[in-house]
Amino acid sequence: MANPAKKHVLLFYCAECEELAHKLAAQSDSITLQTIKWRTFDDGFPNIYINNAQDLRGNHVAFLASFSHPGAIFEQISVIYNLPRLFSASFTLVLPFFPTGSFERMEEEGDVATAFTMARILSNIPISRGGPTSVVIYDIHALQERFYFGDNVLPLFETGIPLLKQRLRQLPDADNVVIAFPDDGAWKRFHKQLDGYPVVICTKVREEDKRIVRIKEGVPAGCHVVIVDDLVQSGGTLIECQKVLAAHGAAKVSAYVTHGVFPKQSWNRFLHKNGLEIAFSHFWITDSCPHTVKAISDKAPFEVLSLAASIADALMI
């Protein structure tokens, strides 16, 4: 029986993802980058042109997206809805960071679930000649959000944890690493993937009018403790966890998040600065949020673990 022909993917990308797109293309000769003219009319609305559109017929097509702010979503959705209609053999949307839902709390009538709205928008991407669109997402914030998607798309939920495990094995004190989770939610979603490491679980308790971080279980004393979570915003929880872990004797504290969102340049709180105590030895993030990658380039303690190889593998499915 003859082997099936090797899949070749034509990859489009938004301007913000250009660096990651080039890393992806470097991973495999089965991925060829394509270009889009991102322009605007005088009234500010998008004026977009997909180069070489006729060449897409019968080819596998993908789009690398970044919904880093609401203003970027409309123009990218316009392209995402158009590409499958160009008679492509299949269409894959790669959205490393699914941004909505990270702050949402449905506590009373009138609260709007924007994560559900975004999932419905993506669920209505037109089908290609090969069938439903595949949507690749990394470490979606709330696990229930995976059930928001309709039957017209095929969500593929990936994780950046293998990148962290690979990096931990390279540490000089790899045998002394303990994994810490900032809350029960982080433990539930990641502990099975980090099986084999000793674990510390932190929790927030209310004391009078304050919420205080405490250690719920585990022993950090004398160890290199790595706090693991899916994303970081202001970083307040990570900082409070670091203080508690250090107070309980941790030799070093580092952190890993898949999505370094860091609104309002909150990454500044973690920088190694002259004369200040180094709270975090390492801070690993992926390149799911391109604007952050540019901002923290060459700034200790930050180190970027690229998703490029993982995405390249996903595109070959």
Image (cartoon, rainbow, N blue to C red):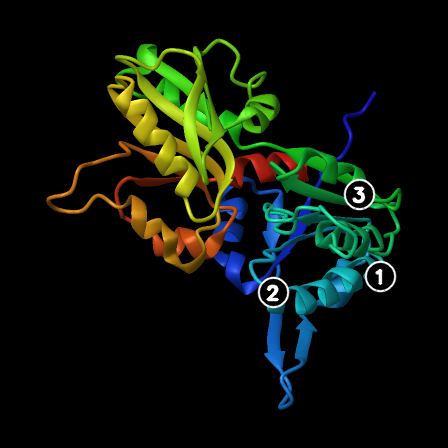
Residue of label 3 = 148
Q: Which mark is residue 146?
A: none
Q: Which mark is residue 35?
A: 2
Q: Is residue 195 above or below residue 90?
A: above
Q: Position of residue 260 (x, y in %)?
A: 46, 46
How crowded pointer 2 is (Cα within 10 Å; few <14, some 14-19, many 20+) is rated as some
Q: Which quadrant of the figure contains the C terminus?
A: top right
Amino acid bearing label 3: Tyr
Q: Residue at x 53, y 56 (%)?
A: 17
Q: Position of residue 48 (x, y in %)?
A: 67, 75
Q: Nearer the viewer, residue 88 or 253?
A: 253
Q: Which quadrant of the figure contains the N terminus?
A: top right
Amino acid bearing label 2: Thr
**Residue 315 visible:** yes
Q: Nearer the viewer, mark 1 or mark 3?
A: 3
Residue of label 1 = 85
How crowded pointer 3 is (Cα within 10 Å; few <14, some 14-19, many 20+) is rated as some
Real-space Cα distance between discs 2 and 3? 31 Å
Q: Residue at x 79, y 64 (%)?
A: 82
